[in-house]
Structure formats: C-alpha cells, structure tokens
Image (spheres, helix red, strand yellow):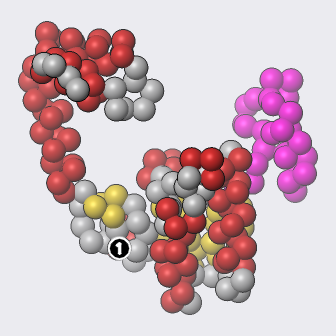
Amino acid sequence: MPHNALDALIEALRRLPGVGVKSASRMAYHLLQHDPAGARQLAQALTHAVDSVRHCALCHTFTEHDICTTCQDAARDRSKLCVVETPADQSAVERTLSYKGLYFVLMGKLSPLDGVGVHDIGINRLLQRVENGEVQEVILATNFTANGEMTAHVIGEQLRARGLRVTRLARGVPLGSELEYVDLGTIAHALHDRR
C-alpha cells in the first residue's frame, strides 16, 4: 500500500503494460515537475473514459454509444465479419483501408495456462451475433500466436458447424523483407499458403 501521493502515482502508472518501477517513477517525476497541467488533463481524460466508454451492443468494441459508428455505417458490407482479439487489432485492420465489412472484438484470446476459457472472452456473444443470417463469411483475424491460433481454431469449428464460411488471415513474408532475415516459421507458412 503506497505511503504517500507520489508513491500512489508511481504505483498507478505501473499498472500500464510494459511499465516498471523506473519508467513509472520517471513519468511521475516528469508530470509533477514539468507538466502539472498535463497530469490534470491525463487524470480528467482517464476519469471521463472510464465513466463514458462501454461495449458496442453488436461488435463488442469500445464506444461511447450503444452501437459504435462502424456498426452504424450503412456503407459497410454486412455479409462479412472480421473477428479480432482487441480494439487495437480492429484499429490496425481499419488503417489498411482494405476491409469494408463489420467486426467482432473478442476482448481477449483463449489462454488455458492463464485460466482464460471460452466463457471468459466474447465467443458466446460472437455466436449470437452471427445467428441473424446476414453474415455469410467470418474472417478470423486473431494473432498468429499459439493462443491466437487456438482461439481461431475453436471459433472456426463452432462457426463451421453453423454452416458459415470461415476464412483465416493469410500468413506470409512481410513486404520489403529479405528471406534470410525472416523467421523459419513465417517462411514455412508462406510456402504452405502460397497462391
């Protein structure tokens, strides 16, 4: 338990991913010494976000409304649903400007070693989401980690059992890379998934 306000601030900053004691201390000292207005702005923005942001009733991403702007967009292709792990992954796909369908955000991935099972992420909500018959193809865009692959496999099996077309993001060699520097697993998948 922190003894004073400075220790409490450092401890709070340590909750951010990848932030240890040294980084948290450096941030705290910077904010207090050089940017107290920025510290107040950060505190207000955090409070406002925690009080205002919720999950979209359709895709489960973060929004300040019942339905997010992507789900409300009549120009989106409602026959395609891209399943991602996090809102950050959704944002990455959107930045490509190459996908015009809808999304479903799981808010996690299966991780048996961490005690995260099917009922701990949005798989049941996803299954409810595809029941209306509008979705024809589900694109599994979970990460290419062991847990992401397992999540894609479990979801894919359940969706195929419901008669849906299920596709997976292709894996391959990044554009502009040289083969000698690409890991062997990526090269193997690129060979297997060649077209």
Q: Residue 98 versus residue 38: which sits nearer the camera?
A: 38
Visible in this render: residue 30?
yes
Q: Which residues are magenta?
A: 169-195
* In the image, residue 87 above or below residue 17: below
* In the image, residue 74 above or below residue 153: below
10 Å neighbourhood of mark 1: few (<14), some, or many (≥20)? Answer: some
Residue 192 screen position, x and y as percent: 90, 51
Residue 64 screen position, x and y as percent: 24, 61
Say which quadrant the C terminus sits in: bottom right
* In the image, residue 14 above or below residue 26: below
Q: Quadrant of residue 110?
A: bottom right
Identity of the residue drawn at 72% across and 79% down: 160
Judged left or right of residue 92, residue 66 is left
Q: Residue 168 versus residue 159: which sits nearer the camera?
A: 159
Identity of the residue drawn at 34% across and 32% down: 15
* In the image, residue 190 above or below residue 104: above
Q: Residue 79 versus residue 66: which sits nearer the camera?
A: 66
Say which quadrant the N terminus sits in: top left
Residue to which mark 1 is pinned: 57
Residue 30 screen position, x and y as percent: 21, 12
> Of helix, strand and loop, which one carries label 1?
loop
